[in-house]
Amino acid sequence: MGRFHRHDDGHGNDDGYGHGHGDHTGYTTGGERVEVLERIFDENDRTAAANRADLDAAGVTCVNLMSSPGAGKTAVLRETLRQLQDRVRVGIVEGDIETSIDADRLAGFGASISLLNTSNGFGGECHLDAPMVRSALARLPLDALDLVLVENVGNLVCPAEFAVGEHHRAMIHAVTEGEEKPLKYPVMFRSADLVLVNKIDLLPHLDVDLALFHRNLQAVNPGVRVIETSARTGQGIDEWCAWLTAGR
Amino acid sequence: MHELSICQSIVDAVERHAAGRPVRAVHLTVGALRQIVPDTLTFCWELVTEATPLAGSQLVVDHVAAVVRCLPCNRRQTLTEMNLVCDVCGGSDLSIVAGEEFLITTLELAEA
Ligand SMILES: Nc1nc2c(ncn2[C@@H]2O[C@H](COP(=O)(O)OP(=O)(O)O)[C@@H](O)[C@H]2O)c(=O)[nH]1
Ligand SMILES: [Mg+2]
Ligand SMILES: [Zn+2]
């Protein structure tokens, strides 16, 4: 979860902070009150923990890959599979399918691919949640894998809120997206353990101020690791692969 | 954007706690660091509860500001923007004290 030390939602901190669940709403109540104190993401988080336990039991590292649409998740994954194919046994949870062409782009490198259909369903198209990833993991041979990469739905808001059981969160930011994205989507940017600055090959054609982007990024996620990449030229993909496979 | 699926999980929890009793209002606590749009949440609540026993119940949102504490110097401050730097020592090793809450606090039951 980036560099932030999370507190549980309002419980167990001694900073003198309280919610005050008293009768402060200003209207009279005839009916009884029932105290609930239930975290709304509890159910998702429980399933995420179960996913994580299954991954740990199989010795698999899982990375949740997030970006806005078109930043290059599939393109970077393709280059990643190309580079790792003889060394690391990779599974892909593909949750961002626009057409079957996306899945085809990842075929041929020996990876196991589990497709999640997020195009319809109840509110399911804007992010992956832990139960969805659980069903996708069930279709992967976890015991025969070292690494599972999850391509999340292209969206800078919702995926940040839903843990799926990953060990690390990586984000792709394309240089074509300008300098301000970290300030506009701070929750996403600060939840990342690593940010890939992709499409770096396009830099000569753009007016983007990369130094300003880095300042904005460091303001919301101080000290976050950054790798400049290009899925086109392969720049930085080896460094990214080294990060993915570190500790093995 | 994800308010619809969130409302569905709120409905599930509320139905569990209400155990069949009629509910008049549901109180939530939402931290400023949560990407929840209250109006969208209220709108989705009406949508999701329509034609269910929770139809007509009210969703009441209590907001909590984002508060951070600087680990080296212990200074607490309330964030007005996402500028994660201590205004005393300039350090950026901050711990989030409040602002990430997202919970159902109480149900108000209707008089039967
Ligand atoms: N020039 C260049 N184009 C890229 C790079 N990465 C991705 N693209 C292109 O950007 C478009 C969107 O990439 P895609 O991988 O589908 O993005 P996704 O939606 O995040 O999966 C495609 O046309 C890719 O070929 C890159 O590093 N350099
Ligand atoms: Mg894609
Ligand atoms: Zn300080």
Image: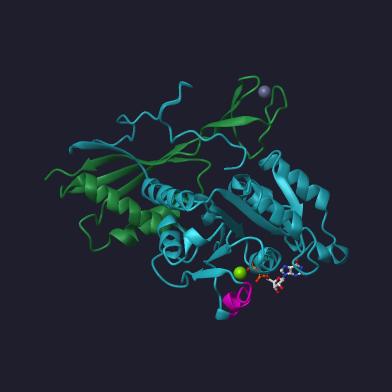
> In x, y percent, where is residue A69?
62, 66
> In x, y percent, where is residue B24?
23, 46
Residue B62 in the image: above or below residue A80? above
- Ligand 3 positioned in quadrant: top right
- Give the image quarter of residue B106: top left
Q: Does B75 sit left or right of B101 as displayed?
A: right
Tell me if residue A105 is in the magenta stretch: yes
- Give the image quarter of residue B75: top right
Residue A195 in the image: above or below residue A7? below
Q: Does A207 sit left or right of A198 as displayed?
A: right
Q: Residue at x 40, y 50 (%)?
A: A50
> In x, y percent, where is residue B15?
23, 50
Q: Residue at x 77, y 44 (%)?
A: A215
- Give the image quarter of residue A222: top right
Residue A115 in the image: above or below residue B102? below
Tell me if residue A34 is in the magenta stretch: no
The number of numbered badges drawn on the structure is 0
Q: Please provide the residue range marked out in magenta.
A: A101-109
